[in-house]
Image (spheres, grey):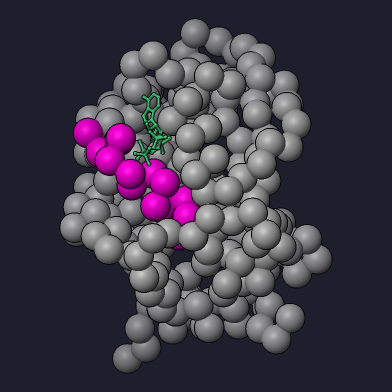
Amino acid sequence: MLKMEEIFPPFGLRIASGAVEMRVLGDEDIPELVELVQGGVQAAGLPMPFLNDWHAQPFAPGSPDGFPTASLAWWWTQRATFAPEDWHMALTVRREGVLVGMQDVHATNFPQTRHIETGSWLGLGHQGQGTGTLMRKLVVGFAFDELGAHSCGSGYIVGNQASAAVSRKTGYVENGRNRIVQRTAQGTCGVDEQRLLVTPQTYLRPDGPVTIQGAGALRRFLAIEGL
Ligand SMILES: CC(C)(COP(=O)(O)OP(=O)(O)OC[C@H]1O[C@@H](n2cnc3c(N)ncnc32)[C@H](O)[C@@H]1OP(=O)(O)O)[C@@H](O)C(=O)NCCC(=O)NCCS
């Protein structure tokens, strides 16, 4: 019988270095992921890092509202709408086999733009141990080396020192500021986002060796083979 990764190649992608392994989210990861979010994501003293506070919604599995129902819809939508001109991959991040966070990567019109955007988070108990830096370095290296990206963009809410440090250590340079809108249970508010860009010329690679599997099949699925 065919394997799922032969039908949907994002499932065959594996990016690993040292104790860290990243793979596209599968249904079997969801219970561990939901419990990870229940343990908290946002560090005290740092700004709310996301466009909406999905991680802070009432924990209510099996309910029509609260977490994780809306997040589940978002993760499944990424699979349902995956297409060469607009794709998202939610990569689970495991450290020594334990699910510790997610590294998102997406692109619009990649064959023309050669640009990807990323976003990431770790469960509170897994922050401050270098994993955030390593996972970002790994996804950026994957984009440059395996997809032929020319640039990777990211952004953080001004004041998010942890995210700023990860970007600096990965070789991003500042790329202007945007005024963006955050939605929380308290309402909507405008905040400043620092934009960042990394190119192969400024990228700082991880220290250890990196293994990437499944990139060839993914390139075919993204219609970028031979570009
Ligand atoms: C941002 C995040 C992914 C960084 O991952 P991490 O594993 O905690 O970061 P690292 O351990 O690789 O550390 C990176 C740097 O951040 C600094 N840092 C970590 N937590 C910090 C904090 N709470 N305040 C200030 N700096 C912090 C570290 O000191 C380190 O810098 P240094 O090496 O120069 O000392 C993680 O903290 C997180 O998930 N935060 C909540 C969600 C979030 O902010 N996502 C980013 C959205 S743009």
Quadrant of picture, ligand 1 = top left
**Residue 185's x, y, as percent?**
47, 13
**Residue 108's x, y, as percent?**
71, 56
Tell me where residue 28 sits by quadrant.
bottom left
At 47% from the left edge and 70% from the top edge, which residue is drawn? 10
- Whether residue 35 appears in this view of the structure is yes
The quadrant the N terminus occupies is bottom left
**Residue 216's x, y, as percent?**
53, 83
- The answer to whether 74 appears left or right of 17 in the picture is right
Magenta stretch holds residue 3: no
- How would you classify the magenta stretch by its main secondary structure? helix
Q: Which residues are magenta?
A: 125-138
- Whether residue 76 appears in this view of the structure is no
- The answer to whether 218 appears left or right of 6 in the picture is right
Above or below residue 67? Residue 182 is: above
Above or below residue 143? Residue 37 is: above
